[in-house]
Amino acid sequence: MAMYTSFPVALFFYFNQPAYFEEWVTNTKRQIIPPENPQNREAIQKLIQDMRKKQMRVVEEE
């Protein structure tokens, strides 16, 4: 009976360590959402400005 109850408790203790969980979550998050790149950010901002200028031209023509 002691083996039956100690096995889940041992697994809970091992897998419930904050350092293990934090490292796993951080690595998974970096794989899904890579860190932001300043060059990409500038390209996005330029694209947004270009789209706004295009919209303003369309509004002015009407």
Image (cartoon, helix red, strand yellow):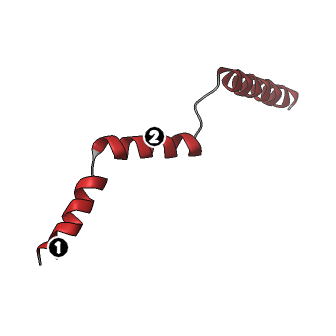
Q: Earlier in the sequence, mark 2 or mark 1?
A: 1
- Residue 25's spot in the image, x, y percent? 43, 45
Residue extending furthest toward the bottom: 1
- Residue 5's spot in the image, x, y percent? 15, 72
Instruction: Say what amino acid the circle numbered 2 marks.
Output: Thr
Question: How many numbered marks appear?
Answer: 2
Instruction: Say what amino acid the circle numbered 1 marks.
Output: Met
In front of the other: 13 or 49: 13
**Residue at image location 64% in from the left, 25% down from the top:** 37
Name the front one of labels 2 and 1: 1
Relative to residue 1, is residue 10 depicted above or below?
A: above
19 lies left or right of 8:
right
Q: Secondary structure at mark 1?
A: helix
Q: Secondary structure at mark 2?
A: helix
The quarter of the displayed image where residue 30 is located? top right
Contact flag, marks 2 and 1 (Cβ < 8 Å):
no
36 lies left or right of 49:
left
Residue 26 numbered mark, or none: 2
In front of the other: 39 or 18: 18
15 lies left or right of 42:
left
**Residues packed near mark 1 inside 10 Å, few (<14), some (14 to 19) or many (20 plus):** few
34 lies left or right of 29:
right
Query: Which residue is identified by label 1?
Result: 3
For the C terminus, the quadrant is: top right
